[in-house]
Amino acid sequence: MDWATREAPDRIAISQAQIPIPSPADACYLAFYPIAYAGLLAALGARSGGSGLDRVRFALVLATMHYGWGAGFVKGVLRGARDTVDTSRIAAQPSQPSA
């Protein structure tokens, strides 16, 4: 009960405030993921052996691979699967003997 009592004034103040949409916080939240991904690629590239050029190529290959996967995922979410059937998940039907 004590927590709810302390939170009530804050909730009322927030509910009455005009929060800009999109807010600067939205930009920070959205910027986090590309920055974190670039940091991950940099860390993986630094750990891989080879020359600096090999490390850059490794990072580009990973980024390209994930971009392609992500673009296909977003396309599938937006357009839907419709009539697409994943045949790898369907058991093969035994062939019927001809009479």
Image: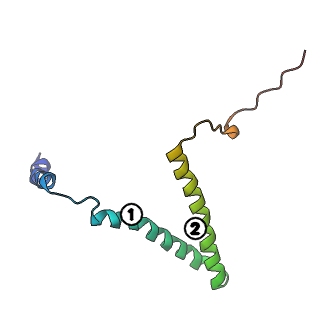
Residue at image point 70% right, 38% down: 87
The N terminus, quarter of image: top left
Residue 81 figure quarter = top right
Coordinates of residue 25 in the picture (x, y in percent): 29, 64
Element carrying mark 2 = helix
- Left or right side of 4 for 70: right
Check contact, mark 2 vs mark 1: CB within 8 A.
no
Mark 2 neighbour density, 10 Å: few (under 14) some (14–19) many (20 or more): some
Residue at image point 65% right, 83% down: 53
Element carrying mark 1 = helix
Residue at image point 55% right, 56% down: 71
Mark 1 neighbour density, 10 Å: few (under 14) some (14–19) many (20 or more): few
- Left or right side of 48 for 35: left
The image shows residue 40, relative to residue 81, as above or below, that is below
Q: Which residue is situated farthest in the top direction here?
A: 99
Residue 13 figure quarter = bottom left
- Left or right side of 12 for 51: right
The residue wearing badge 1 is 30
- Asked whether 79 or 43 is in front, the reply is 79
The residue wearing badge 2 is 63
Gap in angstroms between the C-alphas marked 2 and 1: 18 Å
Instruction: Identify residue type, mark 2.
Output: Ala
The image shows residue 60, relative to residue 51, as above or below, that is above
Residue 67 disc label: none
Instruction: Identify residue type, mark 1.
Output: Leu
